[in-house]
Structures are given as C-alpha cells and as structure tokens.
Amino acid sequence: MKTIIFGITGQDGSYLAELLHDKGYEVVGVTRRVSVDTLQRINHILPQIKIVEGDITDAFSVSNIINQEEPDEIYNLAAQSHVGTSFKQPSLTWDVTAGGVLNILEAIRYSGRKEEIKFYQASSSEMFGKNYTVCDSQKYQDEDTPFSPQSPYAIAKLAAHHLVRNYRDSYGIFACSGILFNHESERRGEKFVTRKITKWIGQFATWKGNQLFIQKVRNQAGEWVDGPSRKEDDPDMIYLHPSDETGFPKLRLGNLDAFRDWGHAEDYVRAMWLMMQQEFPDDYVVATGETHSVRDFLNIAFAHAGVTEWDDYVVIDPQFYRPAEVDFLLGSSDKAKSNLGWNPDVSFEGLVHRMVERDIYEARLQRAHLQKV
Ligand code: NAP
Ligand code: GDD
C-alpha cells in the first residue's frame, strides 16, 4: 500500500507517518519549500519515507504528485491551522485550508484512478463554533450537531468539509472527514495554548533551578555575598529572591475560560487510519468526551512542575484574545467507538504530564548544551 501525506511536517503528519510506516505502507510526504528547516518532527524516519516538494495551493503540483506517485490513500493534514492567525491572515487561510482541499479533490477526480484512491480530510471541531456558550457537561457535539463557525479558519474548514461530502456524493470518491477535537502532544506547535504553557514551564523550571546557583556572587575579597539587587520591580517579570539581578518573563496568555476536549495526537491519527479502512466513506467525530478549561490545564501543568499557586506567574494579555471565541467544546465519539472500534488511550492528566515532562527535559538539555559551548 502506498500513501501520500500532505502536511507530513506537522504534529499529526509526523505521528501518522510513523503509524503508516509501521503498518508497512510506502509513505510519501509532501513538504513545501520554506527558508527554515521544517523536518524536525520527522527527522527520525526520513530514511524510511520519501519526501516530495509541493504546496496544496498549487493545483499543478498537487495533481503532478498524485499522478506520479499513484497512491492508494491520501491524507490531507495540510492547513493554516492556527485559529488566531486566521483572523490576521484570512485570505491565506482560505486559500490553503479551503482552496487546497479543492485542488486535491479535483486532482483525484481527474487522475484516472478515482475509484482506487481513498481520501481523508482533517476537519475540525472548530466548525461547531458558537454552538454552546457555557460549560455544561450535559451538552456535547457529535455528527448531527449544527455548525456555527466563529473564525476564518473554521469557515474555511467547513467549506472543505462540504466539498469532501459533495465529491463523495457527486463522483463516488471514497472521501471521508474526521471531525477531530483538539489534540496535542510533545510535538505540538508552540503557539497553541497547551504547548505554549508547557514550553514556558520547562524553561521556567530550568531557570529556577539555575537561580539557586546564581543568587550569590563573589565580592572582590572572594567572599560569597547576595547578588546585586535589581533596580526596580517589573510586574511582567518573576523574581524568586530579593537579590535576584535578572527576572524571568511571565507567561502571557489570553482567555483562560475557554473549554476544550483535549486528547493526544497519537490516539487521533489511529482514528484517521481506521476511517480509511472502512468499506464505505463517512464522517466521524473523534474526541475524548471530557472537557477542561485552559485554567484546568494550567492547574495540572504547574502542579506537575511543583508549583501550586501560578497566579503570580501569568499575565493576561489582550493581544491573545480573539475577535470571536469558541467557548465550549465537548465531543461525543460514540459513532467512532461503535463503527471503528476506536478509543483514546491517553487521559487528560496523562497528556499534560507528558508534555510538561518533555518540555522540562528539553529545556535542561538545551541549557546543558549552552553551558558546554
Ligand atoms: P500543524 O502542526 O499546524 O501542521 C500543518 C501542516 O500543514 C504542516 O506540515 C504545514 O507545513 C502544512 N502546510 C501548511 N500550509 C501548507 C501548504 N500551503 N501546502 C502544503 N502544506 C502546508 O497542524 P496539526 O496540529 O498537525 O493538524 C493537522 C491538521 O488537522 C490540520 O489541517 C489542522 O487544521 C487539523 N486539525 C487539527 C486539530 C488539532 O487539535 N491538532 C484538530 C482538528 C483539526 P509546514 O511545516 O511547512 O508549515
Ligand atoms: N493559542 C493561544 N494562545 N490560545 C490561547 C491563549 C494563547 O496565549 N490564551 C488563551 N487561549 C485560548 C484560545 O482563545 C482558545 O480558546 C483556547 O485557548 C485554545 O486555543 P488553541 O490552543 O490556539 O487551539 P484552538 O482550540 O483555537 O484550535 C485548535 O483546535 C482546533 C480543533 O478544535 C487548533 O489545533 C485547530 O487547528 C483545530 O482545528
């Protein structure tokens, strides 16, 4: 079996590439030309997979790749996937997140192999949008819940979602959409709230550990004395000791009261593959069935790093508020559970702990490296 993954350099792409490679697939990943290295998440499997250059907004490159590679399965994970960014770059978001999907569907339609190719589209719980505005654990979203998108990103994803259904109905293409709720991991992009928090905790914990050694300095007589005192208190900085010369910048966040149904990406790519193994294409909600606020995430993440009171470490910064917010997401995956036999393995706490531990480990590694050079 041969597969093409659009978006292989992203969080999900990297886990999916591992999963499909382990299952014996020949994996072809599409990467776009950018000025920095975007292969970090897949470096470890590069020798086992093939990389081709392409961009989903370029219809010619998409159809050339599909015609040349002749895949059995195509997974489209490529998108401008940051909701906040979509308010700042709505046109680009539309071109990539909606237009790119149309390019892939058209390429399949005219490939001469449309009956042989299965297509997976990464739809999103963000499409439910302003469905519920308060946290109520009795309410949830599933395949029958109406969509009410709240951002350019969600609107583009919804357009793509409808295109997939339309191409399935119109041309008989095996095209399915996974309506995936938020899923995170140690490989999550650093601008999403979960990773932003755990990355900050990793760096803070490492700085804090190091502070123990720099709180005292040697004077001219060679004696250990308290370090020079800082000039003035800065409300945006953390000082652990009155004699700290330098502080650590506080964690700046937006809305802490949004609720999300957060799972682990490794579990979610398994659901994608299962959808593609069915006899008939269909759309499925993939979620854990538990919802937590950003505040809950902060509580568990900080507690795992040994900090019980984090209020003084976090600054609410209006620049991270969105023009329109999605307040409450909680999914029911009953259909995926019964039709696909899918269940998540990683709990919310397990997810947060894994992310915190990895970011503390990486920050220490980085510091140790810096001290060597
Ligand atoms: P991600 O880490 O942001 O990865 C996005 C991928 O898309 C990257 O590989 C990126 O390449 C690629 N890409 C962006 N623009 C492209 C273009 N014009 N042509 C080709 N590739 C392009 O996202 P993720 O978290 O893995 O999510 C995967 C997909 O699932 C996305 O479509 C996302 O919208 C959707 N989704 C995610 C979640 C979630 O919670 N993670 C939930 C529901 C749906 P570069 O590395 O070059 O930037
Ligand atoms: N990114 C970010 N940064 N979000 C913040 C911050 C901050 O500093 N402070 C608070 N938040 C809030 C956001 O306002 C939002 O309510 C929540 O944290 C989650 O934000 P993100 O982590 O950026 O994720 P998202 O829910 O907007 O979108 C993710 O999930 C979707 C599925 O529901 C992305 O992965 C999308 O691609 C995906 O479709």
Image (cartoon, rainbow, N blue to C red):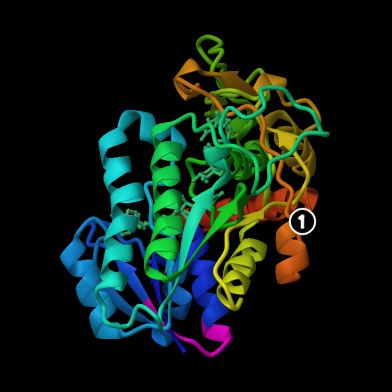
Q: Quadrant of ligand 1?
A: bottom left
Position above or below: 134 against 199: above
Which residue is farthest top? 232
Location of the C terminus by quadrant is: bottom left
Q: Tell me if residue 373 can be seen.
A: no
Position above or below: 363 against 84: below
Which residue is depicted at the point 48% across and 24% down? 320
Q: Position of residue 335 (x, y in %)?
A: 72, 59
Q: Mark 1 Cα within 10 Å, few/some/many (few <14, many 20+)?
A: some
Q: Which residues are magenta?
A: 21-28
Q: Which residue is mark 1?
A: 334
Given residues 230 and 81, the one toward you in this image is 81
Q: Position of residue 277 (x, y in %)?
A: 59, 78
Which residue is depicted at the point 59% across and 32% down? 217
- Disc 1 residue type? Asp
Task: Tell me, yes or no, whether the highlighted magenta stretch contains residue 341.
Answer: no
Position above or below: 343 against 97: below
Which residue is depicted at the point 32% across and 70% down? 30
Q: Tell me if residue 108 can be seen.
A: yes
Position above or below: 209 against 50: above
Q: Quadrant of residue 70?
A: bottom left
Q: Secondary structure at mark 1?
A: helix
Which residue is depicted at the point 38% across and 63% down? 170
Given residues 180 and 312, the one toward you in this image is 180
Q: Position of residue 88 (x, y in %)?
A: 33, 29
